[in-house]
């Protein structure tokens, strides 16, 4: 039986290959491989798309989060509130700066941080809240921003999975003081290597993020602050510019495919827990994630039928060996720990045919 691709980048590339080659050829011709004109063009287009004043492209989604924290002066002894149900990078960048990630459990329907639990986690050392817009759906930012305002905290959206999504009519990456996204190849807008971006409306924060991204310098060989080498390659910017031309269409296709998945599971009376999307949200379905029982056995069965799956994420951050010093053992975050044992992501990309969706749903339902 033929193997279904989990993500099909080849179908997308076939559509835009001439534009990719044209743009990459232009970079090869001008030779500005670092901070070339494509960087400025991409930043301008992404900022306009999101609806903010500033976009700073960077070397990865992880570096985007790190740069945002560094620009806000997060340092040893500080605390940053976030979710344990996310990729390691979210907590990792906090710990890298010597600060402490303070985990708050998630909403069982959306998998995003539960705003009702945030205020109780705030201490005199809290400097920021970093909600993750998981699986492509934005967190509850109105409530989170209100809490942050009461306590004079910065809100940084980890939008590494949600670029292109909307919350109450506003774009992800325009919902808080700073937002960070990823252009990892499998993301809804992905490069052909690592990449990311930071967004803000704050002029001073934008200046600081741009300095941090480029070794802390404000002009050549003058370094008022410590930074990193966090620049996006010009070749990746060229690729992203080509992909961005069809991005809105692909977001619509992802939405239609996610809806088709959910309606087919509902029609099958499968008992599968499908993604819950708040009525005021749209999602980009960075993953189409369901909850199942006996996940390991089902994954093996699906693999034999040519249906690949993935688990995002099997171990909450509080149970990762790297964070054992936080002393948050099993049972500390019951919702995160429960869903971590049940979630399973199915193939998702803008070019999934309906016949393939049917094959996947039938396989999951044991048909």
Image: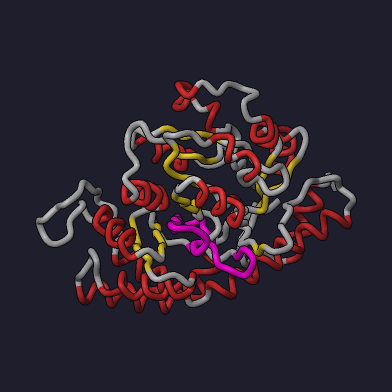
**Residue furthest to the front:** 150
Is the residue 215 above or below the residue 344 in the image?
below
Residue placed at 48% from the left, 22% from the top?
A: 324
Name, please, the residue furthest toward the left.
221
Residue 354 position in % (x across, y down)? 75, 66
Which region is colored magenta? 166-189
Q: Is residue 343 above or below residue 278?
A: above
Please give the count of numbered marks on the rendered protein: 0
Taking the image as shown, residue 206 lies to the left or right of residue 13, namely left
Residue 238: x and y in percent read 35, 71
Q: Coloring scheme of the render?
A: secondary structure
Main secondary structure type of the part rendered in magenta: loop
Of residues 322 and 152, the one drawn nearer to the viewer in this rendering: 152
Report the front residue among 361 and 210: 210
Instruction: Locate residue 173, reporting x and y percent.
Output: 49, 62
Q: Nearer the viewer, residue 331 or 154?
A: 154
**Residue 307 in view here:** no
Q: Position of residue 158 (x, y in %)?
A: 49, 51
Asked if residue 355 is positioned above or below residue 127 in the image, the reply reads: below
For residue 336, side relative to residue 177 (left or right):
right
- What residue sits 28% from the left and 61% below the top? 207
Quarter of the image where one finds residue 242: bottom left
Is residue 298 something one can see in this rendering? Answer: yes
Q: Residue 187 colored magenta?
A: yes
Q: Residue at x 70, y 64 (%)?
A: 280
Residue located 59% across and 75% down the image = 249
Q: Quadrant of residue 349?
A: bottom right
Q: Is residue 269 magenta?
A: no
Left or right of 25? Residue 102 is: right
């Amino acid at each position: 039986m033929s193997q279904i691709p989990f993500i099909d980048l080849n179908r997308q590339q076939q559509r835009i290959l001439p534009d990719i080659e044209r743009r990459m050829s232009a970079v090869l011709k001008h030779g500005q491989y670092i901070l070339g004109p494509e960087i400025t063009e991409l930043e301008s287009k992404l900022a306009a798309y999101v609806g903010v004043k500033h976009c700073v492209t960077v070397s990865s989604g992880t570096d985007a989060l790190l740069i945002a924290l560094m620009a806000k002066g997060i340092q040893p002894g500080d605390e940053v509130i976030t979710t344990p149900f996310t990729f390691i990078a979210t907590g990792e960048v906090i710990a890298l700066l010597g600060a402490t990630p303070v985990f708050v459990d998630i909403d069982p329907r959306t998998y995003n941080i539960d705003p009702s639990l945030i205020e109780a986690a705030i201490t005199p050392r809290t400097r920021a809240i970093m909600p993750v817009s998981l699986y492509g759906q934005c967190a509850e930012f109105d409530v989170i921003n209100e809490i942050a305002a009461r306590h004079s905290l910065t809100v940084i959206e980890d939008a590494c999975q949600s670029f292109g999504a909307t919350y109450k009519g506003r774009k992800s990456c325009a919902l808080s003081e700073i937002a960070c996204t990823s252009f990892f190849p499998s993301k809804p807008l992905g490069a052909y290597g690592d990449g990311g971006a930071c967004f803000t409306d704050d002029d001073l924060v934008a200046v600081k993020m741009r300095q941090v991204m480029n070794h802390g310098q404000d002009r050549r060989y003058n370094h008022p602050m410590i930074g990193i080498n966090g620049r996006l390659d010009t070749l990746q910017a060229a690729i992203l510019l080509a992909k961005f031309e069809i991005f809105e269409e692909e977001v619509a296709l992802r939405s239609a495919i996610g809806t088709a998945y959910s309606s087919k599971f509902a029609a099958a009376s499968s008992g599968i827990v499908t993604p819950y999307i708040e009525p005021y949200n749209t999602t980009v379905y960075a993953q189409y994630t369901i909850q199942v029982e006996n996940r390991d056995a089902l994954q093996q069965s699906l693999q034999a039928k040519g249906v690949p799956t993935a688990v995002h994420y099997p171990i909450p951050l509080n149970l990762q060996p790297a964070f054992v010093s936080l002393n948050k053992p099993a049972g500390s975050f019951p919702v995160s720990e429960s869903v971590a044992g049940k979630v399973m992501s199915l193939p998702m990309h803008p070019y999934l045919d309906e016949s393939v969706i049917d094959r996947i749903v039938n396989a999951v339902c044991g048909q």
